[in-house]
Structures are given as C-alpha cells and as structure tokens.
Amino acid sequence: MISGLEILKTRTYNSTDVRKTLFSVARTVPTYEIELCTVEMGGINYVNGEAYPSEVGRILVAHPGQRRYTKGHFECQFVHFICHDREFEDKYLRPLPVSLRLCDETRAPHIFRAMTGAWAKREDGYELYCIGKLMELISAIYSAGKLLGSIDEKYRRFSHSIIIATEFMRENFASPLTLNDIAMSAHISPSYFHLIFKNSVGVTPARYLLDVRMREAQKLLINTSLPLSEIAGMCGFDSQSYFTDVFRREEGVTPGKFRRDNSDIIM
C-alpha cells in the first residue's frame, strides 16, 4: 500500500475468454474498478440499472457497493484498487463519474499500457510506479468529471466539446489564441461556442484562458529565476509590459513583488 492506495490487479480483459453467455452474472462491486474499453463488441455495461455502452476510449468507473453486469462482449484494460485514506476517497474518488471520455483520448490508453506492463513485469519499484500511474489516471478523470458536473444541463450534449476546448487552452496557452482558434478545436462556430462555454463553465473563453495563463505565470515566478520577459512570452503575453499590467490588475501586485513575497513557496 502506497499513499493510501492499494492496487489489487491491473491487466487486459476480454469477456469472450471468460464467458459464452450474452449476460454476465450481476455482482456487487467490492472495490474501485476503472476500465478503459479498447475493443468494441456491442457490449453494454449496467451499473445500478443505468446503461453505459462499451465504446472504444470510454472509461467506466465502478464504485464499491454498486451493482453491475454486462450485456454482450467487450475488451478493456482495467485496474481494481482499494483506498485506505478516507479523506482522499471522499474528496477525489467518490465524486468520479461512472462513465466519461477524456478529451485527450490517447492519455488513458498510455497510462493503462504503462501501468499494466509494469504490473506484469513486477520489476523492482513496480508498485510505486503503478500507484503513480493510477494517481495520474484518477486526476485526469476527476478533472474531466468536475468540469462535466459544472455544465448546465441544457448544454450537456456539448460537454465533450467543452472539455476538448479547455484542454486545448491548457496545452496551447503560450500561443496567441483567438476565439476562433478555440472554437475550431471544439468544432463549433465562434459565436455559439462563446455562448455555450460561458453558460456551461461560468466564465468566457477569454477569462478561462487568462486564468490558465496567470496560474502558469505564478508557478514560473515562484519556481524559477527566469526573467519576466521570458515568463511573459512563455505564458502567451505579447510583452513584459503587458504582462506586468495584467498581473497587477489581477493580483494587485507586480510580478516582481509577487515573486519576492512568495519566494519560500513551491507550486
């Protein structure tokens, strides 16, 4: 057990290797189970009576005490684990949605391949490595689920597009992004994208992007000795003077004073 998490098993599973019947046996989930569908065979997962299709790239999270069974077949990579830290469980595991897709659909497969591979080889330090990958997976699902939960029900059908747009901004904040650039990443017209984003996330795309840039700037100010002109460029600001003006407006102090006042903090 490391950091309150204990992995019981993680590997690839193909339902046709285990059963020939159409339905699996209904069971009560004893631990946390996270699955990533890797091969579609028309299967449907049922968790507490709700149906979730087994689609490639879709993640299923089953919580302890839930009832689940499957109709049809599928192939997935999975991890079963226990959490011994009640505070961590309440804050990060219980809120996880039962089913979702990550906007970067290469991320979960990469995590699972690394985790299942290390678990199978069981080389020195494999448990620590696998726990690290599990934490990365939980973090990705938690962040995506938190955003999904904040989206107005009227715009819920655009949830995946909104997640893609937020990920696009987090990955490209150093570039001079326009509303059109961000909307294109979500395949929605700029005007309608602005409307659904603001009503779903609670802030405009421009405000969200500025918050991302400010958080990154704060990290660089505290954790590096890079000059302000370089930090400005790395965070998507046109110039050091513009960066200073925006930073003072948002934080109430200049970047230099913020760095001096927080020199003993690690972000």
Image (tube, rainbow, N blue to C red):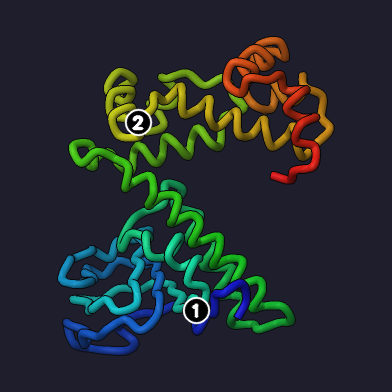
Looking at this view, is 259 or 44 the one in front? Answer: 259
Displayed quadrant of residue 101: bottom left
Q: Is residue 120 above or below residue 186?
A: below
Please state the horizontal and vertical placement of residue 52, each as a whole percent of the image: 23, 64
In this picture, residue 26 sits left or right of residue 58: left
Q: Amino acid at mark 2?
A: Gly
* Residue drawn at x 42%, y 65% as measured from the top left: 90
Q: Which residue is mark 1?
A: 10
Nearer-N-terminus badge (1/2): 1
* Residue drawn at x 73%, y 27% as measured from the top left: 258
Q: Is residue 117 above or below residue 52?
A: below
Closest to the camera, between mark 1 and mark 2, is 2
In this picture, residue 151 sits left or right of residue 153: right
Displayed quadrant of residue 14: bottom left
Looking at this view, is 66 or 112 the one in front? Answer: 66
Q: Determine whether the residue tagged by mark 2 lies in a helix, strand or loop.
A: loop
For residue 218, the mark is none
Q: Quadrant of the C terminus?
A: top right
Q: CA distance from mark 1 to mark 2?
A: 38 Å
Q: Quadrant of the N terminus?
A: bottom right
Q: Determine whether the residue tagged by mark 1 lies in a helix, strand or loop.
A: strand
Disc tally is: 2
For residue 202, the mark is 2
In this picture, residue 252 sits left or right of residue 75: right
Q: Amino acid at mark 1?
A: Thr
Binning the other alpha carbons within 10 Å of mark 2 as few (below 14), some (14 to 19) or many (20 upward) gives: some
* Residue drawn at x 22%, y 68% as measured from the top left: 42
Please state the horizontal and vertical placement of residue 194, each as a whole percent of the image: 33, 23
